[in-house]
Image (cartoon, rainbow, N blue to C red):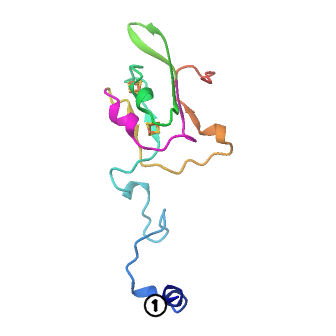
Amino acid sequence: MKTIFDFFFNRDSLRKVETELYPDPVSSRGEQDLPARTRGEIKNDLTLCTGCGDCVTHCPTSCIELVNGPEKDDRPNVEVFNIDFSNCIFCGECVSVCEPQSLTQKKRFLLPVEKPADLKIRFGRRDDADD
Ligand code: SF4
Ligand code: SF4
């Protein structure tokens, strides 16, 4: 009851504010102001990815799909690399095991889409690939 009375009579105005709006319309604080280790969306730079599959093995929710095609000009040919962000828990495990550092974790965490299926993001070279 004390908490409720404090709230209704605005006695909590003296308490330290622990939460803040994001993005903050007053201070204009946004994505760039989030802590350096913020775990947001994952990106894959296919020019670095070797298709080794370590990220797939370590992903706790099995939300990464990887299909390697035949090598082209002695270079790895990652045909399918999908991340289903509807299952991803943004743990960053895939990024930490990726030796060539082709995977990076950005600060962006708002990923609005119209359909859940649109949360599957395709990085591979095969545009038509579904799995
Ligand atoms: S661990 Fe890195 S290099 Fe290996 S398949 Fe995954 S993204 Fe590519
Ligand atoms: S952040 Fe975690 S859950 Fe998401 S793709 Fe990487 S390993 Fe899987």
Q: Position of residue 29 (x, y in %)?
A: 42, 63
Along the viewing direction, whichever of 26 and 83 lies nearer the viewer:
83
Along the viewing direction, whichever of 45 and 84 lies nearer the viewer:
84
Specify whether 122 is left or right of 29: right
Ligand 1 quarter of the rendering: top left
| Residue in the picture at 44% in, 59% down | 30
User: Does the stretch in magenta take in 95?
Assistant: yes
Q: Position of residue 17 (x, y in %)?
A: 40, 76
| Residue in the picture at 63% in, 38% down | 118
Give above or below for 91 relative to 46: below
| Residue in the picture at 55% in, 47% down | 111
Q: Quadrant of the C terminus?
A: top right
- The picture quadrant where one finds residue 20 is bottom left
Residue at the front extreme of this rendering: 1
User: Does the stretch in magenta take in 124?
Assistant: no
Q: Which residue is mark 1?
A: 11
Q: Position of residue 63 (x, y in %)?
A: 52, 33
